[in-house]
Image (cartoon, rainbow, N blue to C red):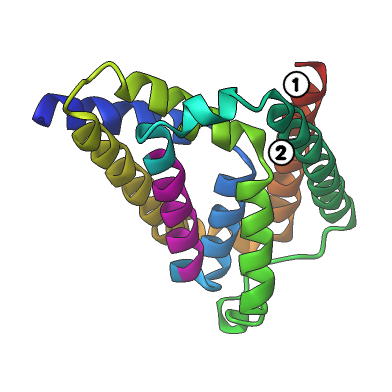
Amino acid sequence: MLAAGLSGFQLALGLILAIGAQNAFVLRQGLKREHVLISVLFCALSDAVLISAGVTGFALASAAAPWLGEVLRWGGVAFLTLYSLRAAWSAIKGGEALQPRAAGTAAVMRVILTLAAITWLNPHVYLDTVVLIGSVAAQYPGREAAFGMGAVIASFTFFFSLGYGARLLAPVFARPAAWRILDGIVALIMAGIALRLALF
């Protein structure tokens, strides 16, 4: 059981570490200290739901509906493209700096809706959590639950570390230029992911 759990932890952590829209958003919330708990909980709980679906065999069900993959793919391309353009505009416009006293100004519902779109409209999330983790979990007959639990623990560990550890970078992001660089990097990453999805 322990070996299966550790394998699930390692696999999930390796997948989550890749920089993406979700991680960038949580990093931003952590830096601004705005609704950090809600952000990390939403991401971790979403992962838990998707991982559970994969471990319990949802990957097989999704394979029976091939059209679903195309819908998720082009929906993801559209959303990631818009997200990339928004980040690029922020990088060009500039003027943002970290102001801890202004924390909490963003509407909670707006944060949740953005996270929901970033998480549930991203085809890579399904490929990583449902399909890949679900497929590997099947290699541990009788220990799938332990494997899935290890993967879920990895997700919670990562997102809480990212969200609450981001404040260590606060001095760097007190300068507007740092935000412009971060937004520029996010724009390039999101555009790259959207392009890969479109050409997949």
Magenta segment boundaries in residue numbering: 38-51
Q: Residues within 10 Å of mark 2 (few under 14, many from 20)?
A: some
Residue 78 image point, x, y percent = 84, 41
Tell me if residue 135 comes above or below residue 39 in the rendering. Answer: above
Which residue is rendered at x = 79% and y = 45% of the image?
Answer: 79
Tell me if residue 126 comes above or below residue 169 in the rendering. Answer: above
| Nearest to N terminus: mark 2 or mark 1 | 2
Amino acid found under the numbered disc labelled 1: Arg
Q: Which mark is residue 196?
A: 1
Residue 100 seen in this snapshot: yes
| Pick the front one: 128 or 142 | 142
Residue 132 image point, x, y percent = 46, 23
Amino acid found under the numbered disc labelled 2: Ile
Q: How many labels does the image show?
A: 2
Which residue is disc 2 drawn over? 185
Which residue is rendered at x = 47% and y = 34% of the image?
Answer: 58
For residue 45: magenta?
A: yes
For residue 35: magenta?
A: no
Tell me if residue 177 comes above or below residue 137 in the rendering. Answer: below
For numbered disc 2, what is the local secondary structure? helix
The quarter of the rendered structure image containing the N terminus is top left
Residue 13 seen in this snapshot: no
Classify residue 89 as left or right of residue 115.
right
